[in-house]
Structure formats: C-alpha cells, structure tokens
Amino acid sequence: QVQLVESGGGLVQAGGSLRLSCAAFGSSFSSYAMGWFRQAPGKEREFVAVISWSGSRTIYANSVKGRFTISRDNAKNTVYLQMNTLKPEDTAVYYCAGRGRSGFPPMGVHDYDYWGQGTQVTVSS
C-alpha cells in the first residue's frame, strides 16, 4: 500500500511558475510509474504527465508539453511537476498517481492504483 500526499499548489498570475511535489509513503515507490492528472470544475480528470520508475522516460499531454516538466527523486520517494508559463486554463485540482503494475506508459485514470488527495492550482489572468 502507498499513500501519496501532494503539496505546492496555490494562486499564481498567468505566466508564472509553480512546483508541485508528491511524497510517497509506503513500499516500492521506486518501482512505480508515477503520473500527474488534473481536474477542472465540471470537467473529467485528465492526464498531464507520466514518468517511468527510473525517470528515463516521460510523456506529456499536448496542452502542457514544453511548459511542464515531471521528475522524480527515488531516494526521497518524491515526484515533482514543475509548471512554467502558466495559463488560466491550467487552473484545476492536480493529483498525483502511482501505478503498482508493469506496463508503460499509463495514461488513463484506470491505469493507476494509488491517488493523492489533490492540490489546487489557480492561475489568474
């Protein structure tokens, strides 16, 4: 079992930056692919980015490619999402997720086994 706890959300002006963190508590974090999703009011949860267990492979949604960077530190059991050049349409609750099974890349909500509670990101225009 793995518990995921996100932090780093907040209010930022358009064009600004935020870095989200997701700390994992439990075993086997370093063997999990980790992803970030987001959910805006009235919309379905959508894929943002995923990183392989080693960090050697990453995939991004087209909407964030070139602006967001996912990374991980397995020694600290933490995955990060660096968000630059933020836009009002990036406003959402951001969730980190862990996949405790083989297979890459996991890009759907049902591809993940563990979820954090979410952190709010609000981008003002």
Image (tube, grey):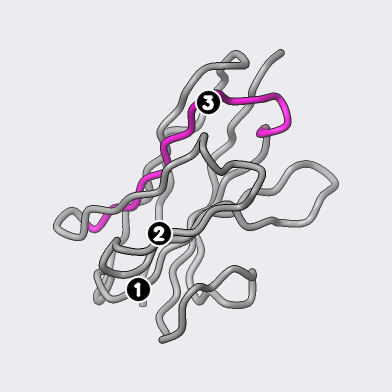
- Crowding around mark 1 (Cα neighbors within 10 Å: few <14, some 14 to 19, many 20+) is many
Stretch of the chain drawn in magenta: 77-90
Instruction: In the rendered structure, find residue 32 and report the number of the disc placed on it.
Output: 1
Q: Which amino acid, by three-letter code, is at mark 2? A: Leu
The quadrant in which residue 12 appears is top right
Q: Where 18 falls versus 3 (above or below)?
A: above
Asked if residue 103 lies left or right of residue 41, the reply is left
Residue 29: image x %, image y %? 28, 69
Given the image, on which type of amino acid does mark 3 rest? Gly
Residue 72: x %, y % from top left: 29, 53
The residue depicted at 66 percent of the width and 25 percent of the height is 87
Residue 76 position, x and y percent, is: 18, 53
- SS for dot 2: strand
- Left or right, 89 with respect to 110, comes to right
Instruction: Give the labeled residue for mark 2.
Output: 4
Tag shown at residue 10: 3
Q: Residue at x 51, y 38 (%)?
A: 66
Q: Is residue 50 left or right of residue 62?
A: left
Q: Answer whether residue 30 is magenta in the image.
A: no
Q: Secondary structure at mark 3?
A: strand
Q: Is residue 108 above or below residue 19?
A: below
The residue most toward the left is 75
On the image, the x and y values in percent for residue 35 come to 48, 60
Looking at the rendered image, the disc whose residue lies closer to the viewer, 2 or 1, is 1
Give the mark nearest the N terminus, 2 or 1. 2
Name the front one of labels 1 and 3. Answer: 1
Q: Quadrant of the C terminus?
A: top right
Q: Is residue 83 above or below residue 44?
A: above
Q: Is residue 86 magenta?
A: yes
